[in-house]
């Protein structure tokens, strides 16, 4: 299914996610949030490139690191701020907080892999209804340590459901590197369940949009599960300050910051950045937040 997407809108959405989450971290330092936060700094292009190809009726599942996915899926910034602040005017009345969101076919859960069986069930329902919709489930490389993921992959393959599993491989499960927690090959694990893997790079939002357009079209047409293995980089800590990675490593992966690529490709980057900063500043002023 073709999408008429203005490329500038892709770069703007990447900036929205980055500036939103940077604002969250400042708010956390001031004690303005209820509970913890996990940002997706460095992984914004994945969310935008994929979900810009979603259509009404597609169901999206996410994890504890969900803000970028929610915003990329068209989520409202103001109500998300309020939700994470524990405000009754938030998306879920301030009860879900940063990790547990339920709104307009978007679902997130902080328990790793817990939503995978649910995404299989919803995808099966879409196949039965024959409505051309799919389910999209974001997981991380660390989530491959959860047994329920493999149960879900098995059932998704057996029932041949229209499910796209987007595995954001940033190489770290909290503070443990993939070399120390994962044995084997991710793509081969997919093939073990007769699920087709696609491995792509996760920093260029324009390239990701194009890659995901063809992948999603395949899932819609064939109504079978596919796993996209996206090699990406988590520029920030697991949560706020729990980062034991070496500075040399972090400095190296910052070269893959999607904002650097957007800045090179988008001639209007600075104007868009100023516009987004103003938009978010206006929202924060409206809800009485000063950072």
Image: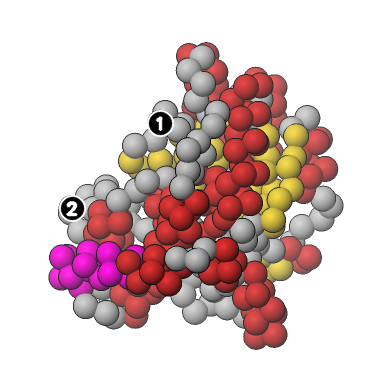
**Residue 111 appearing in the image:** no
* Label 2 environment density (alpha carbons within 10 Å; few <14, some 14–19, many ≥20): some
Q: What element carries label 2?
A: loop
Q: Kindly identify the residue that appears in the image at 37 percent across and 46 percent down.
A: 74
Q: Is residue 13 above or below residue 276?
A: above
Q: Which residue is drawn at 33% across and 41% down?
A: 103
Indicate the position of residue 150 as horizontal and vertical percent values.
Answer: 69, 38
Q: Which of 8 and 192 is in front in this view?
A: 8
**Residue range corresponding to the magenta coloring:** 276-289
Per the image, the residue denoted by label 1 is: 56
Where is residue 186 drawn, in percent x and y? 77, 48
Q: Report the label total.
A: 2
Q: Where residue 77 sits: x, y (%)?
A: 30, 56
User: Is disc 1 placed on a helix, strand or loop?
Assistant: loop
Q: Residue 44 carries which label?
A: none
Mark 2 highlights which residue?
Answer: 89
Identify which residue is drawn at 67% across, 52% down. 230
Q: Look at discs 2 and 1 and give the one toward the viewer.
A: 1
Reply yes or no: does residue 20 show up in magenta. Answer: no
Q: Quadrant of the N terminus?
A: top right
Name the residue rendered at 47%, 43% in the picture: 5
Principal secondary structure, stretch drawn in magenta: helix
């Amino acid at each position: 299914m073709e999408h008429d997407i203005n490329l500038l809108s892709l770069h703007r959405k990447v900036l929205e996610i980055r500036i939103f989450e940077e604002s969250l971290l400042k708010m956390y330092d001031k004690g303005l949030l209820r509970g913890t936060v996990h940002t997706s700094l460095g992984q914004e292009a994945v969310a935008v490139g994929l979900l810009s190809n979603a259509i009404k009726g597609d169901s999206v599942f996410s994890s504890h690191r969900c803000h970028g996915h929610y915003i990329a899926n068209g989520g409202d910034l103001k109500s998300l701020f309020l939700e994470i602040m524990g405000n009754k005017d938030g998306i879920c009345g301030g009860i879900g907080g940063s990790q547990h969101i339920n709104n307009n076919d978007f679902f997130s859960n902080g328990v790793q892999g817990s939503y995978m069986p649910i995404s299989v069930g919803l995808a099966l329902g879409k196949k039965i209804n024959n409505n051309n919709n799919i389910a999209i489930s974001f997981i991380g490389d660390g989530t491959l340590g959860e047994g329920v993921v493999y149960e879900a992959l098995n059932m998704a393959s057996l029932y041949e459901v229209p499910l796209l599993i987007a595995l954001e491989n940033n190489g770290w499960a909290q503070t443990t590197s993939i070399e120390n927690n994962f044995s084997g090959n991710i793509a081969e694990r997919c093939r073990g369940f007769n699920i087709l893997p696609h491995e792509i790079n996760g920093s260029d939002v324009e390239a990701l949009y194009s890659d995901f357009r063809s992948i999603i079209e395949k899932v819609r047409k064939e109504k079978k599960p596919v796993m996209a293995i996206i090699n990406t980089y988590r520029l920030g800590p697991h949560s706020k300050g729990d980062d034991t990675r070496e500075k040399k490593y972090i400095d190296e992966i910052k070269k893959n910051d999607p904002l650097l690529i957007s800045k090179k490709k988008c001639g209007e980057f600075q104007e868009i950045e100023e516009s987004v900063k103003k938009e978010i500043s206006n929202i924060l002023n409206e809800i009485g937040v000063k950072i």
